[in-house]
Amino acid sequence: MLDYLTSGWGLQFLRAIGTSLTVAALSFVFCILIGILCTLLSRNDFRGSASLVNLYTYVFRSLPDILLLILIFYSLDGAIQSLLNRLPGSSDIRLNAYVPAIMSTSIVLGAYATELFKAGWADIPKGQFEAGQALGFTRVQSLVLVILPQVYRKIIPHLGSLSLISMKETALLSVIGIPDIVRTASIGARSTGSPFVFYGIAIAIFVIFAILCSRVFAYLESRARAGAQ
Amino acid sequence: MTEGSPAPAIEISSMSKWFGPFQVLDDIDLKVMPGERIVVCGPSGSGKSTMIRCINGLEPFQKGRIAVHGQELIQKARTLDAVRKNVGMVFQQFNLFPHLTVLDNCTLAQRWVHKVPRAAAEKIAMAQLEKVRIPEQSRKYPSQLSGGQQQRVAIARSLCLRPKVMLFDEPTSSLDPEMVREVLDTMADLARDGMTIICVTHEMGFARGIADRIVFMDQGKVVEEAPPAEFFDKPREARTRKFLDQVVR
Amino acid sequence: MTVLLGYLHEILQGLTTTLSLFLISLVIGFVAATIVAAFQIRFPGVLAGAVWSLMFCIRGVPLLLILYVVYYGFPLLPFIRETALWTVFASPYWCAIICLAFVEMAFTSEIIRGAYYQTPKEQVEAARSLGLSSFQTFRVAILPAMLRNGFPPYTTEVILLCKSTALAFTITVMDIMGYANEIRARTLDIYQPLLIAGAIYICTVVVTRLILSSLFNMIAVGGAETADQK
């Protein structure tokens, strides 16, 4: 195994880890933003927005992630290609494959994040909003200073599993040809003829991430619990 | 106790409010002078809480007008903010922010709404906590305090913003009996300092001892308005007498 | 329109595969999860801890990776290649079922364990104090509470499993996703086949949810009744 790692595969894997972590981190951030935004929309007085959010979460919690990824990957590329063809003098620019990857993961995880934030939000007593108003906070200040910190404390464990899922979702990148951890392992397995070393390394990377993830969120939870209740 | 200022602190004129088809407030008129202490009482569902929640814009109303220190209350963010800067509110459920320490609860609005620097905000907060007699709890979280202590923190939190008027919405109703005293004492201190107070409460002893005027509400209307002596000893209205029979026994 | 109907017809050929992948791995996964969870609850200790750690690791690894290991890796092992196991692992369909059931076991066992430990102690004590045996206690006090607590997360898990079956096409299984992707590659039509497949998956999930929620209502009411009778 050491032979493989020193003969260039080690570097490949490091790059793959970088790729997967970057995509996972970006998708995680975006899905949180989607979650907050959709929760705000669904609590809006405007009745249509709430049902729109419900439709969004229902559809994307039912649709296979891989289907959405392939759909976005091929259609976005085509759409941008045809757009570029209409513009005069532009050369052939291929869309970075990371964009559809991050988009589809964020959309799918955003649906889960929305459910999470909605549930956490619903637990917050009405008095907290009123106290914020009575003290003269603007809506944004109330949101950032009073509401979100409390929602965060309620949903920390779920945020942990969400971050683990966003890491696991990066495995799908291999299907559209991005050299993530799984694809690097597959290529290595095929070209060297020792699949168990390469798949073993990939599995180890994910397991280590899972352990780190659970440690970090357990720590965050204990820190938050030290204060409120 | 009044400072002789002719302008009323709060002026409510012919205000009405509906929840859907139900009229909860019916043509309310009330004038409160600076430094006056008003106790609002009445059976549950009489609209007394709703009325004081209207004064700082927590509830919209459909008819009439409310002015706080000359500033008319309109459902627009700008004017609401201006009014709320003058009006402090204490809730039945305390509504402290559970994720912040007592001190941070008291400094949050100062720092973000009034842009007071942190050190100065903490100094003001400690002074107010001193006043409600719990400075030693400043590093604790609300969940570590008793109900009475939490309510006193809530009062301190409001006072930090130097309001000209304090509204109390049944401040002792969700407290254990042995803690009611400490909160009422704090409010009495406040009254002695000349704060304009409107308090919804069932504590008739407090009303008799502190209030300049008692406002009795029933079914969304102000039924009777009188100084405590007159109110308790010779109430004019039948409904007031009936209510007093039930509360005072 | 006729083109679309043609696509629909072709993609629906994969429906039995998708449904059987889903249902077979669901049943195997649930049985395995029950055994794993029961072991952890019944024999707490080092071994149960090891089992829990193994399940934790499985939950951390992407299904796609497990599919690749089993489908591309296992055939290279002599004890699989040269025994009767080969008939199973040579088929991408059965590889997919094994992987799905394996992952399902890891997630479901944790749901069962969680539901068990959420059962209020007072209820168990009350049942024991009435002189019920430990099996009766389980039947009367623990199981109904477990069903109530465990059903909502299990519903989520079942839906996730249904979605995950779509990954089977990456190891050449021709399920709904497989046919849709094949049409996409062959005709260069992107939206039509994939959206049709998406609609089929959504319908499957809708039906699954309906079945599960009516099942939950039946069990929840029944469980409460048996608890009352005793």
Image (cartoon, coloured by chain):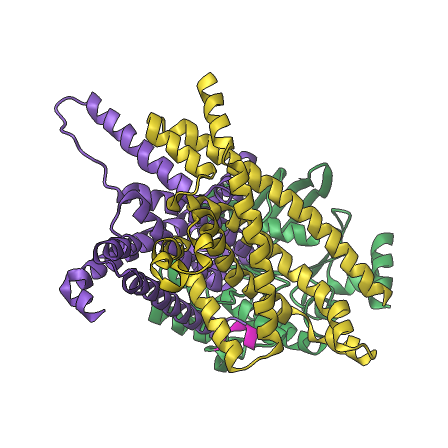
Chain colours: A purple, B green, C yellow
The one nearer the camera, C93 or A87, is: C93
Q: Is residue B162 visible?
A: no
The answer to whether residue C198 of the structure is visible from this angle is yes
- Residue shown at the point (31%, 41%) measured from the top left: A100
Relative to B198, is B147 above or below?
A: below
Considering the image in quadrants, where does the N terminus of chain A appear?
A: bottom left
Kindly identify the residue that appears in the image at 70 percent across and 74 percent down.
Answer: B176
**View extreme (top): residue:** C2
Residue interval drawn in magenta: B140-144
In which image quadrant can residue B24 be found? top right
Q: Is residue B99 above or below residue B221?
A: below
Q: Position of residue A85 (x, y in %)?
A: 20, 23
**Residue C77 position within the rendered picture, expressed as x and y whole percent measured from the top left:** 35, 62
Q: Is residue B125 left or right of residue C119?
A: left
Can you say whether A158 is above or below A77 in the image? below
Residue C114 horizontal side relative to residue A104, left or right:
right
Q: Confirm whether the magenta stretch covers residue A59.
A: no
B142 inside magenta stretch: yes
- Establish if B187 lies above or below C158: below
Tally the numbered discs.
0
The majority secondary structure of the magenta stretch comes to helix
**Which residue: 26% across, 61% down?**
A194
Q: Is C161 situated left or right of A1 in this image?
A: right
Residue at 19%, 66% (x, y): give it: A5
Tell me residue C58's x, y (percent): 44, 63
Q: Quadrant of the C terminus of chain A?
A: bottom right
